[in-house]
Amino acid sequence: MAEVLVLVDAADGTVKKPTLELLTAARSLGEPAAVVIGAPGAAAATKGALAEFGAAKIYVVEDEDASGYSVAPKAEALAAVAAQASPAAVLIPSSNENKEVAARLALELGAGLITDAVDLGADLAATQSIFGGSITVQAKVTRGVPVITFRPNSFTPEPAPAAGEEVPVAVAFSDGAKRARIVDRVTEAKGSRPQLTDASVVVSGGRGIGKAENFDIIEKLADSLGAAVGASRAVVDAGWVGHQMQVGQTGVTVSPQLYIAVGISGAIQHRAGMQTSKTIVAINKDAEAPIFELADFGVVGDLFQVAPQLTEEIARRRG
Amino acid sequence: MNVVVLVKQVPDTEGNRKLDPGDHTVDRAAVDPVINYIDEFAIEEGLRLKEAHGGEVTILTVGPERATESIRKALSMGADKAVHVLDDALHGSDALQTAHVLAKALGTLEWDVAVAGSEATDSRMAVVPALLAGLLDVAQLTQARKVTVDGSSVTVERVTEGGYEVVEGSTPAVLSVVEKINDPRYPSFKGIMAAKSKPVTVLGLSDLGLDQSDVGLANAASEVVSFENAPPRQAGQIVKDDGSGAVQIADFLAAKKLI
Ligand SMILES: Cc1cc2nc3c(=O)[nH]c(=O)nc-3n(C[C@H](O)[C@H](O)[C@H](O)COP(=O)(O)OP(=O)(O)OC[C@H]3O[C@@H](n4cnc5c(N)ncnc54)[C@H](O)[C@@H]3O)c2cc1C
Ligand SMILES: Nc1ncnc2c1ncn2[C@@H]1O[C@H](COP(=O)(O)O)[C@@H](O)[C@H]1O
């Protein structure tokens, strides 16, 4: 059975959920093999989770260059692993950085590239949702080893313990891989909330919150659900929250199990970033707001009443 | 410092965008085209680099005849000249092929940095700048929210999921910029008039040493097998808040096992 490579995304030693999703999906295509690329010591903490979720092998490229330079070394490392493993496909969790890695990998492999898939068939046909969710596409790579990136929450991770045999791979990085040096890494996101891009629940606030100080209404509701916090562009443009939180065409695309839009009108550009959410709930005082066209459940009402009550109600039910 | 700005023309996202049922490519006639939104930030950044360091700003577009409109707009913002790669054989090219063509076109120009937008609204792939850097074997300084140039050294603040990275490289380099890096200027009346006489060089595949077999739908490394309009979302339940709205949401979430 051919191997199916999955690029591992981990933060602070924890394997991120989208990686576990792809290990799960890889099982139906062949033998899942995880690829960990990072600074020396990066792989150790990830091995348990990777084996638990089905990685028969764990390829490990640990090298200062892999973490010291932007994007290109990851693509070269993946290409080196692919040369060794002759995989049926390379599956990569979509993120801005990983899509660039996937692109350069496709170049290295002379292969076709599909980005932001949301499902995959046994024949390697990838499903994509384009134009703000209005069209569903089936796409296939026609040359080389398919390189496919997937949006978070495309699959449900299921454990299936496997050997998790560690295979160290040494890569001699080219000069070309070392042209963009990372001189500093700065973390701005504060707190312990889940990351917006791959959260399974997202609560977003819009201009309806009125002013920056009211944004804690959104944050409290999010915290009651263990959710990530998002915002519409109006809120970002007003400077109430940072740009990283913008959901939509020019912000982050999310596809969570549950999206709660509070005081958001639902402009087409906002919808482009959240339309594929599995369940959508909206709170808006305007019954005509376009967000209600998408909502599975909507409350026409004053967010200053409904949102805090909801926070309390959820806290009560969760005990 | 000579700057090339990569500008893509895309269907306006306000319109009802479609795929062509015949060959499954983006239907560029269905909706009026505009400059890819983020590319306006790339143009602005290019103009600012010129203002600070001298040199010329050249617009580079691979696209159909009508892309001329977007090129003129970019010139009216203040760019000096443009190169338009126009060839019917390009129809249906994928991102890899487009990057090949852009790389060849850059080969005809003198440049220090090529500035792209971070993502096109039609493809939403956000890969062309990375592909281009890889093909040209130059520094990839992408997803920038800030660009600083000092001689041949270029430093960017690259947006990451939880913050940013400071990434440094040397010219020549391929940059991409995110929205919010600057405020794109509006074309002035004078700019619009001046744009009419600025040079636009039109190049075909043969001018770039490329062949039909290098590009186009038939030679792409991926294909759209089929597509369908997504079924409209099932109409949801909308209630007017009478004081019980929050409890009703909680009931709904509980029924869906979301809490
Ligand atoms: C090129 C381009 C790109 C864009 N990209 C994005 C993007 O990525 N993301 C994005 O979000 N937008 C984007 N936009 C902007 C988009 O068009 C909208 O302007 C924006 O989404 C509106 O944000 P909003 O819904 O918060 O504000 P508004 O449209 O002002 O809506 C506020 C809503 O709050 C409701 N409200 C007010 N008070 C209350 C209350 N007390 N209780 C309950 N409800 C209340 C109102 O009824 C209204 O529906 C883009 C626009 C352009 C042109
Ligand atoms: N056909 C094209 N002509 C010129 N620039 C392009 C073209 N396609 C993509 N680009 C550039 O690459 C960026 C990212 O595009 P994409 O990878 O398609 O999301 C765009 O914002 C443009 O700056």
Image (cartoon, rainbow, N blue to C red):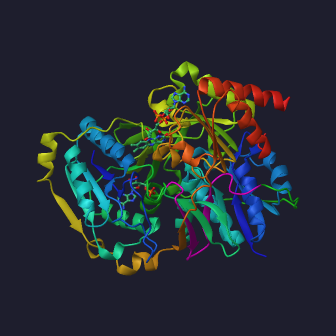
Is residue A54 depicted above or below B41 in this figure? below
| Residue B220 picture location, percent across and down | 47, 74
User: Residue B26's image quarter?
Assistant: bottom left
Q: Nearer the viewer, residue A123 or B160?
A: A123
Which quadrant would residue A59 be assigned to in this image?
bottom right
Q: Where residue B218 appears, x then y in whole percent?
A: 44, 80
Q: Quadrant of the N terminus of chain B?
A: top left
Which residue shows up at 19% across the image and 49% down it? Answer: B80
- Residue at image location 40% in from the left, 37% down from the top: B181
Q: Is residue A141 magenta?
A: yes
Residue B243 drawn at (x, y percent):
68, 26
| Residue B85 visible | yes
Name the residue nearer the viewer: A66 or A111: A111
Q: Quadrant of residue A303?
A: top right
Expressed as whole percent of the image width and height from the top left, the position of residue A155 reads 72, 57
Q: Which residues are magenta?
A: A132-156
Residue B202 placement, left or right of B218:
left
Please tell me in which quarter of the rendered image ligand 2 is found.
bottom left
Please tell me which residue is depicted at 32% across the width and 51% down the height of the picture: B5
Q: Nearer the viewer, residue A16 or A294?
A: A294
Q: How many marks?
A: 0
Figure quadrant of the C terminus of chain B: top right
Residue nearest the viewer, comparing B154 with B32: B32
Taking the magenta stretch, the answer to whether it contains residue A174 is no
Q: Is residue A216 above or below residue B28?
A: above
